[in-house]
Amino acid sequence: MEVLITFITLLAAFYGILTYWHKYVREPEDTKLYTVQLFESARERNKQLLGELNKYASANNAYNDHFMQRFTFNDTIQLIERCERELFTEENLQAIRKSSCTGRNIESLIDHLKTHDKHVSECLTHFRYSYLKT
């Protein structure tokens, strides 16, 4: 009987250690990896939109033409370039990689990256549909 109690106690302790490891070691690493991937994806989509808008505006001399929602091509390009300079920097990426990735700060960052990526995707879709007719 004592052997059974000892075995169950050891099994419960092992389960507790495993739960702790999953919650405080594994989960933050998964969140960090997800955040880095989200950051890199948003940065890449940002560059893609910037490149396509610049190419179109340059080829059609359309920098002062309306693009969407009271923004001209030039306004949109400047806004995207500002995001490139201020948000999607290597310093910010390294800060994400070095962070502990816990709490509300990381959740907020993930939400902001998703929102930004959604808006960039909407601009890209609008541009391709309205101007490139694809």
Image (tube, rainbow, N blue to C red):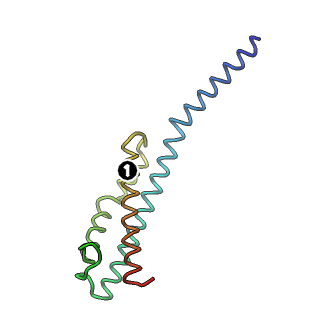
Residue that badge 1 annotates: 109
Element type where label 1 sits in the image: helix
Look at the image and tell me in which quarter the N terminus lies.
Answer: top right
Q: Is residue 96 left or right of residue 9?
A: left
Toward the bottom, the furthest residue is 60
Q: Position of residue 113 (x, y in %)?
A: 39, 56
Establish if 113 lies above or below 71: above
- Locate the C terminus and report the quarter of the image it occupies: bottom left
Tell which of 67 and 10 is nearer to you.
67
Drawn side of residue 62 relative to residue 5, left or right: left
Give the quarter of the image for residue 98: top left
Count up the numbered dots. 1
What's the amino acid at mark 1?
Leu
Seen in the picture, residue 22 relative to 47 is either above or below; the reply is above
Q: From the viewer's perspective, is residue 115 above or below residue 75?
A: above
Q: Residues within 10 Å of mark 1 (few under 14, many from 20)?
A: some
Residue at image position (66%, 18%) is: 9
Q: What residue lies at 41% left-to-right and 44% top-to-bottom?
A: 99
| Residue ID at (33%, 79%) | 54
On the image, the x and y values in percent for residue 72 come to 25, 77
Residue 118: x, y in percent?
40, 63
Q: Is residue 12 left or right of 129 when viewed as pictured? A: right
Image quadrant where residue 76 sits: bottom left
Quarter of the image where one finds residue 84? bottom left
Residue at 34%, 78% (x, y): give it.
53
